[in-house]
Amino acid sequence: MSSIKDPIRIGNMVVKNRMVLPPMNSNYSNELGGVTPQMIEFYADRARNGVGLLVMEALSVVPEPKNHGVQPMIYDEKFVPGWFNLTDRVHSYGAKISAELAHYGSEGAIGQKVSASDVSHYVGEPVHAMTIEEIKECEDQFAEAAYWSQVAGFDAVTLHATHGYLMSQFLSPIYNKRNDEYGGTLTNRMRFIKHVIEKTKARLGSRYPVMVRISSDEFFAGGIEIDEAVQIAVRLEEYGADAIDVSTGMTASYLFNIRPYSLMPLEGYNIENVRKIKSAVKVPVIYACGIREPEMAEKIVSDHAADMVCFGRQLLADERYCMKILREDGDPIRYCLSCQECLTKMTMGRSLRCTVNPRTGREWLWPQEMTEAGEKKRVAVAGAGPAGMEAALTAARRGHDVTLYEKKDRIGGTLTAAAIPPGKHRIADLIRYYEYMLKKARVKIVTNTEYTSATAEEEKPDVVIFGGGARFMRVIKGSEGGNVLTAVEALEHPEKVGRNVVIIGGGVSGCETAEYFCDEAVEIEYKRMKNFREDIEYRARLREGAHPKNIAVVEMMDRLCADMDEYNRATMMIKLKENGVSQYVNTRVEEIANDKVMLCDTDTGKVFALEADTIILAAGLKPQNAEESYGGAKVYYAGDSGQIGKIIDAVYSGRCIGLHI
Ligand SMILES: Cc1cc2nc3c(=O)[nH]c(=O)nc-3n(C[C@H](O)[C@H](O)[C@H](O)COP(=O)(O)O)c2cc1C
Ligand code: SF4
């Protein structure tokens, strides 16, 4: 029986284990498309920490179209020295590395869009349908880029034939409307990729591994589904592919590929499809999408559902993850939250970052082993939310004597309530991670204790880190009433919430609270994207025995969840609609009058009332006030107490302060 820890051969490449870092666009390269120290250290770090095979993020085989301003490139010899530095570092840790070769076709954001036909999800933008000569030239460009990859020390190439970029545009009936030898039948739609494999093999030799990344299902009406994906894999093997790496979805249906926490099932959602592909081919098959638990990865390999397993976001969240699987690191796993901050940052053109791992993308600045503090200090951290916990942990790991104070009876702060809404259970794992790590770092934890200036006068710490978080302000007239709860209070004490609920504030916090209290009366199965306008096809079914409350969400702005990433927002809006949550946007709260909330439509000026047993405040956060001073201690403000932000901001600020003192 095979194990994820066993070596495997692909063509002439032997990989020491079956753990794969899949390609993830990082925006770490420079404007010329070259390598940076930031990029080298990101990959070297995963190689040092046990990954067997790294698949380098999409490298463009042409100067344009590009996906973004700092698109990494491999179309010319001039890129070779930079990539060589990177592959050399990866090899020094015994790992192998493949270059994902990509052409963005009609989905490149920058430059002339080209494709099999004039189709793009950038609806209305001009797309040039390639001529036969241009297609043949492009086949040569792929083979040329493969050659430079080999020269640069890559052990293999991975052809990017998934996610709706050029190669998959030829494969997919959504994009390929041709009626010549490159369109129509599957044989014709596969001609482009067949030629690329043949030309690459002719140039590099038959034993140099050429892997192909495909979608098991495009999750798009009229696109490739699993039966056709199986046929594609079988033919790729015939054409000479040495391994099939199986992802899902395409640009327009990224929601289904890189699943956000709101889209169930969240983990292992490609297993049954990949199993079908694996049973149809003899070459190694690589599983991708939604793996968090080592046991699930192990089972994929031991059950022969695939030969290797990708850990994408999980390796952003925990660079030591593979060492933990290999039992060379006994610490708990820091799980990915599927919060999509990484993806959001990347699509905004910013560096790839991670909510739970502030070191991702900063490996070149922050070595894995923290530098010991020159002067050991007595540090008091007031507040055990994400910022306080991270600051305490970092400071303790650097040798400071740290005490963490929390006024509640447990650590976690706002994370405790944040872990309650559907899909957020990984936040509870994050709290457990901190519990373990803080104990290991010998941080003294004092719960049920509010840290005050009097405590500081008595204990005389050198440093106080104030991580008191934020609180919802009760500034609306009537908001001091007994039936008015904050979102945190409501989630922590659901028994206090009545049947008719008005939630004030339609941001993430308000909408997730609504989602939680509507009892998810309706079961929703998300099927696929309907079109490039981003409409989702889904089926909704009333759950038996559900007792939904009457919930209204009131928001000043013109849309709900404006502060949520687009991926989670899409499903959230469907959930609220199907669960019958009333939505009032462009609406101001005038006052709360016992069991009524008086509202004003800011477009029309019309004033109206909503009946409510319970009113939940989910807007108007304000930093908690720290004391004027804490004896003579130097004071730092971490997380929301410095600046209101998301978990990613809180954890980062905690790490920075911990490293600074
Ligand atoms: C920030 C980000 C960038 C990505 N960029 C690429 C890419 O360049 N090429 C590619 O084939 N897949 C890309 N993907 C998809 C991943 O390789 C992987 O298939 C996906 O994240 C699902 O796996 P996971 O749940 O393990 O993260 C990207 C994913 C993320 C999160
Ligand atoms: S940013 Fe969020 S989704 Fe991305 S890897 Fe980190 S925890 Fe996971």
Image (cartoon, rainbow, N blue to C red):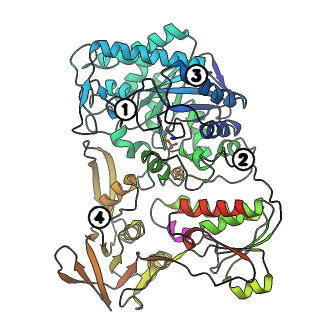
Q: How far across and how far down the image is residue 39, in percent?
A: 59, 38
User: Does the stretch in magenta take in 412?
Assistant: yes
Give the SS element for disc 1: helix
Name the image quarter holding residue 252.
top left
Secondary structure beneath label 2: loop
Please state which amino acid type lies under the numbered disc 4: Arg
Q: Please tell me whether mark 3 or mark 1 is closer to you in this view.
A: 3
Disc number for residue 80: 3
Residue 348 among those drawn in magenta: no
Q: First in sequence: mark 4 or mark 3?
A: 3
Q: CA distance from mark 1 to mark 4?
A: 36 Å
* Mark in front: 1 vs 4: 4
Who's the residue at 44% across and 38% down the image?
69
Depth order, front residue of 440/287: 440
| Residue hosting label 2 | 367
Label 2 or label 4, whichever comes before in sequence order? 2
Find numbered disc 4 in the image and state the secondary structure of the residue it sits on. loop
Q: As displayed, is residue 650 above or below residue 236?
A: below
Q: Are marks 4 and 3 in contact (CB under 8 Å)?
A: no
Q: Earlier in the sequence, mark 3 or mark 2?
A: 3
> Is residue 211 visible in the rendered structure shown here?
yes
Residue under label 1: 226
Q: Position of residue 528 (x, y in %)?
A: 31, 44
Amino acid bearing label 1: Ile
Q: Is residue 40 left or right of residue 617?
A: right
Spatial CA distance of label 2 from label 4 is: 42 Å
